[in-house]
Amino acid sequence: MRFPITHTELESIAIADFGLSEPLREGAQILTLFATERISAKLIVLFPGQILPEHWHPPVGDDPGKEEILRGYWGTVRYFEQGDAPVDTALVPKGKEHCYTCGKRIDLTPGSQVIIPPGVKHWMQGGDEGGCVISFSTCVRDILDQFTDEDIVRTTRIVDDGE
Amino acid sequence: MRFPITHTELESIAIADFGLSEPLREGAQILTLFATERISAKLIVLFPGQILPEHWHPPVGDDPGKEEILRGYWGTVRYFEQGDAPVDTALVPKGKEHCYTCGKRIDLTPGSQVIIPPGVKHWMQGGDEGGCVISFSTCVRDILDQFTDEDIVRTTRIVDDGE
């Protein structure tokens, strides 16, 4: 199952590491298909066990905040949303349990989808074979996303280590 | 190239005939993937030569009108937009030339996409093998779409012919 993309798009796939410098543990491969002032669509690919860290989309001015629909396209992406269910800490990086509070799990397989209202905390993880979801949303302002992990910054910092 | 859909979705594919009762000439196969108050996504499949008639998305109250992105997924869909280019009348049903005014043609093949601003007139036609596009848009109010063809109604009428 391949999603048709152009050569230009192939060259513009972003690897997000959320400033944590451990992209295979907490990171995501993201291709923005388009982004206008009103709507956007992305492909998000997660390797097996790779985590897109817990975050939410806050209100911005007159906008109630980003609404997002995730639709499974290939493989499995484990989606976790805020709720009463406890977090399965075996899935979370050791020592980072405080960064993951959402335990309500929905496995996104091809054709299944979830609607994520503004403000609802969520995170995702690639299943045993990894997975790909399509993210459809209202206007994207990634830089304003709020993360549970206070160490996260949305833009990778290049650190001069003095060597 | 198959787009993964669920069994429930398979059963809910709509065939729009725009009230013209000639769906193979002017019609479309449409699967709504989701539709919220803010955003929507559909798959639109057109058979070879089949036409989705010329229309535009008008403003609705405070909303400037639907913005739509069409992205080629399979085959070819010929997209026609308002502009200076003359209409290729060979592609239009005989006797219906007055219903097609947009001649600026862009062929949507897998991975290519167009952004359709509110109010911009457009129509589509399946290419030689037919085609499938993904339609991403702001809130859908199909019932308010405006068509060039005054015979078009958005809901099929069941006509009692008295027999």
Image: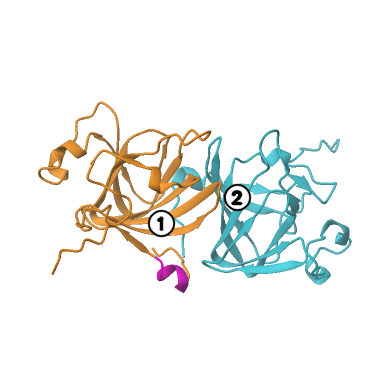
Chain colours: A orange, B cyan
Q: Secondary structure at mark 2?
A: strand
Any mark on residue B18, and which? Answer: none
Viewer-closest of B9 and A95: A95
Viewer-closest of B125 and A65: A65
x and y, in percent, of residue A74 in the image: 35, 56
Q: Residue furthest top?
A: A84
Instruction: Report the amino acid beneath label 1.
Output: Leu
Residue found at x 78% / y 42%: B153
B82 to A152, vertically: above or below = below
x and y, in percent, of residue A84 in the image: 25, 26
x and y, in percent, of residue A76 in the image: 30, 51
Q: Chain of mark 1?
A: A
Q: Where does label 2 land, which residue?
A: B30
B123 to A12, vertically: above or below = above
Q: CA distance from mark 2 to mark 1?
A: 22 Å
Tally of numbered tags: 2
Please give left or right for residue A161 compared with residue A13 in the image.
left
- The range drawn in magenta is A7-12
Q: Secondary structure at mark 1?
A: strand
Could you tell me if the residues under marks 2 and 1 are in contact, i.e. CB atoms within 8 Å? no
Please give left or right for residue A131 compared with residue B66 in the image.
left
Instruction: Report the amino acid beneath label 2.
Output: Ile
Magenta: main secondary structure equals helix
Viewer-closest of B54 and B4: B54
A21 to A106, vertically: above or below = below
Q: Where does label 1 land, which residue?
A: A43
Residue B146 seen by the camera: yes
Please give left or right for residue A156 compared with residue B47 in the image.
left
Residue found at x 65% / y 49%: B15
Residue found at x 22% / y 34%: A101
Q: Chain of mark 2?
A: B
Mark 1 nearby-residue class (10 Å; few <14, some 14–19, many ≥20): some
